[in-house]
């Protein structure tokens, strides 16, 4: 267990999502983490210090000017004793304080004095998250080396409010904490300075009529993880993304597309490149004639036929181009005969490498790669294959980028 014996300082700030911090404490402790908590005044309006203390089995700290707390633990020692600091939920107000280095309460003072990895899980109303002031604060914090998880997109606690602002689920935050504690340091990442990398990610949506489309379950997480690692490794990255609910990593060129044809055009427009990684789950077919109006249901029992045409194969087209990148990596999403089909794709499409993964959902015996946070991949080349153990998509990205950096 990655968290076994690790000291985690959890800062809980004010917001309706504060109740999820209670479950987060449980989850972190289940994995062996030793948890100390600091609560802001706002947090105590939503959950009680008593509940927090009962779950973490350590005194809760909340007062910078409390002589007993400061004498026994001290705001500097809180950070020094921790292996990792997590802020969850992080309110818009607290992000603003952090970004500006304010230290007028215990939570903000601890963070200003912090010298440990810091993971922040924001939660707020979508308009607050989208507000230019919050965007500036988040950019500032990312630039300061703060790691972010979420927020997620969905329904908010307030009635009739939906968008990006939900706190990530406790297990997702735990996973991010584990990743942070096991991640290689930036300096250990491969060096890709001066290299231009083209990455496709997410599904494509092929319209049927103005309101319906053909799609698949790709979330874009694997492709976005690759993009993030390539940026960290110093590459100039162009990320061509189908419709996903993910915040793009900083420091890259993002091109948003809907359909396979648009993705192909964006790929062509983004050349030349040194490396191309095609992680997108491109729809194999599109509807022949997209209806200009919503198709009506018709008589009972009537089923409207859909006539499909094959979409362009972006990977194959790219591999055959004159200005083909020196290294082209395709993915293979299979539910059976994984290696066999991956080898066929390698030669049929003309890629240098295929990353094969089993995309069977959990209900079909898979690990739920599409949409999930973990993956099991096999690296298939003309020389054979290498199977990697199950790991996070982020770790797959780091390992794959390391391989590519050695080959380019
Ligand atoms: O997005 P996530 O939820 O994180 O899930 C990750 C993933 C499962 C989508 C990813 O790991 C993955 O496997 N991506 C490739 C999905 C896919 O479409 O596989 P395929 O076997 O159908 O296609 C093989 C390759 O050809 C892929 O590189 C694909 O991008 C490419 N392709 C496919 C069809 C097409 N018309 N054009 C293409 O370029």
Image: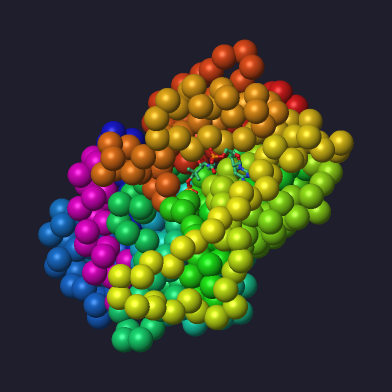
Q: Of residues 139 and 170, which is closer to you in this image?
A: 170
Query: Residue visible at 14% across and 67% down?
Result: 50
Q: Residue furthest right?
A: 322
Most common SS among magenta residues: helix
Q: Is residue 181 magenta?
A: no
Give the magenta part as a residue range.
12-36
In this picture, residue 389 sits left or right of residue 247: left
- Residue at the (81%, 54%) spot, across then down: 269
Whether residue 316 is situated above or below residue 267 in the rendered picture: above
What is the quadrant of the N terminus in the image?
Answer: top left
Residue at (65%, 28%) from the top-left corner? Answer: 348
- Between 231 and 226, the one lying in front of the other is 226
In percent of width and height, residue 388 lies at 45, 24
Q: Where is residue 359 in the image (x, y as percent from the top left)?
A: 41, 40
Q: In this view, does 206 lie to the left or right of 63?
A: right
Q: Can residue 103 be seen in this view?
A: no
Look at the image and say whether residue 15 sits in the magenta stretch.
yes
Which corner quadrant of the image does residue 104 belong to?
A: bottom left
In what quadrant does ligand 1 lie?
A: top right
Residue that protrudes farthest toward the bottom in the picture: 159
Percent of width and height locating residue 44: 25, 76
- Residue occupying the point 59% across, 69% down: 290
Above or below for 401 versus 196: above
Residue 289 appears in the picture as rendered: yes
Left or right: 148 in relation to 238: left
358 or 78, which is in the foreground?
A: 358
Numbered circles on residues, count:
0
Quarter placement of the C terminus:
top right
Question: Residue 285: x and y, percent?
Answer: 56, 52
Q: In this view, does 240 lie above or below 61?
A: above
């Amino acid at each position: 267990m990655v968290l076994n014996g690790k000291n985690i300082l959890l800062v809980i700030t004010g917001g309706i999502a504060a109740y999820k911090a209670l479950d987060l404490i449980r989850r972190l402790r289940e994995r062996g983490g030793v948890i100390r908590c600091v609560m802001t005044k706002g947090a105590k309006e939503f959950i009680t210090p008593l509940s927090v203390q009962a779950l973490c089995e350590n005194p809760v700290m909340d007062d910078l000017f409390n002589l007993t707390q400061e004498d026994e633990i001290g705001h500097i020692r809180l950070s020094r004793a921790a292996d990792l600091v997590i802020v969850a939920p992080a309110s818009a107000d607290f992000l603003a304080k952090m970004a500006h280095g304010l230290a007028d309460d215990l939570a903000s003072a601890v963070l200003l004095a912090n010298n440990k990895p810091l993971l922040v899980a924001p939660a707020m109303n979508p308009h607050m998250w989208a507000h230019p002031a919050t965007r500036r604060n988040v950019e500032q914090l990312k630039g300061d080396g703060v790691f972010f998880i979420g927020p997620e997109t969905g329904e908010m606690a307030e009635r009739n409010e939906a968008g990006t602002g939900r706190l990530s689920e406790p297990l997702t935050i735990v996973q991010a904490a584990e990743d942070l504690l096991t991640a290689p340091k930036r300096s250990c990442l491969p060096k890709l300075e001066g290299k231009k990398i083209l990455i496709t990610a997410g599904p494509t949506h092929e319209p049927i009529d103005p309101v319906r489309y053909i799609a698949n379950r790709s979330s874009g997480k694997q492709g976005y993880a690759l993009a993030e690692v390539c940026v960290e490794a110093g590459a100039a990255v162009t990320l061509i993304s189908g419709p996903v609910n993910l915040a793009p990593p900083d420091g890259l060129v993002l091109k948003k597309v809907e359909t396979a044809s648009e993705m192909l055009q964006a790929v062509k427009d983004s050349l030349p490149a040194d490396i191309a990684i095609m992680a997108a789950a491109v729809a194999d077919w599109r509807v022949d004639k997209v209806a200009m109006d919503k198709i009506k249901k018709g008589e009972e029992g009537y089923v409207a036929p859909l006539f499909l045409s094959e979409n362009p194969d972006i990977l194959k087209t790219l591999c055959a181009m004159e200005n083909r990148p020196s290294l082209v990596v395709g993915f293979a999403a299979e539910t059976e005969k994984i290696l066999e089909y991956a080898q066929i794709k390698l030669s049929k499409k003309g890629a240098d490498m295929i990353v094969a993964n089993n995309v069977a959902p959990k209900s079909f015996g898979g690990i739920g790669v599409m949409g999930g946070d973990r993956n099991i991949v096999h690296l298939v080349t003309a020389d054979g294959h290498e199977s990697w153990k199950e790991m996070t998509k982020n770790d797959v990205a780091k390992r794959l980028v390391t391989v590519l950096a050695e080959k380019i």
